[in-house]
Image (tube, rainbow, N blue to C red):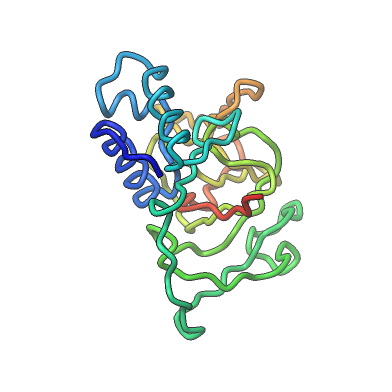
Amino acid sequence: MLKLTARQEQILNLIKDAIENTGFPPTRAEIANELGFKSANAAEEHLQALARKGAIEIAAGTSRGIRLLGAHAEPATPKVPAALMMSLPLIGRVAAGSPILAQENLETSYSVDPAMFASKPDYLLKVRGESMRDAGIMDGDLLAVKKVDSAKNGQIVVARIGSEVTVKRYRKTGNTVELLPENPDFKIIKVDPEADEFALEGLAVGLMRTWH
């Protein structure tokens, strides 16, 4: 791999830190803001240079589609003893009106290394649709979710509205909760927790994906 400049090393470390702390790579705007660039385009130029040098892989069409490669990827870890692995149930389509972890909603379970996640998840949710595309969460991904009943503004949550379960970014202003998509083709969902049947089912703490 070609030698990196000091600025490229700085951006690479920023990507590593974001993945380690949140489970997701940063957006171009977040990189620009963190490093004081005037626009996201400057961040994009550095990312393209890192891709040309073989440090990262960029997935087209998503703002968080960054994957570390080679020596910068997550180091190969020794096989984790079975006793240290945790079993996470995989939730498929949620049956109307049933608790998210009800037996009829479970497709299978995965044995995973808990060290993969910043916080210990309680279950995996199969993502449906493209509403969170620009957060790097794609149709078919397995979202690692920690059960919570409250969230901070800006966090990615699994929420239930009536019998529908959705993954969105959370924002609360006064008594109004807004569930924000990360795709301009989708509308913001506004919820009145007092009037609507609404509950937080969990907080996104990581992502599992098979890269092809």
Q: Nearer the viewer, residue 28 or 8?
A: 8
Pick the front one: 141 or 35: 35
Which residue is pictured at 72% across the width and 57% down the height? 92
Name, please, the residue furthest toward the top.
Answer: 38
Q: Nearer the viewer, residue 185 or 68?
A: 68
Horizontal placement of 121 versus 43: left or right?
right
The image shows residue 121, relative to residue 182, as above or below, that is below
| x, y percent for residue 98 | 70, 58
Horizontal side, residue 67 vs residue 34: left or right: right
Q: Is residue 17 above or below residue 5?
A: below
Residue at the (63%, 23%) spot, across then down: 187
Q: Closer to the camera, 31 or 197?
A: 31
Which of the 4 image quadrants contains residue 88? bottom right
Q: Position of residue 21 (x, y in %)?
A: 34, 50
Task: Identify the residue at horizontal 33%, vertical 24% (top origin).
Answer: 32
| Res 13 → quadrant | top left
Q: Is residue 10 left or right of residue 128?
A: left
Residue 162: image x %, image y %?
Answer: 67, 43
Residue at x-position 48% and y-position 78%: 79
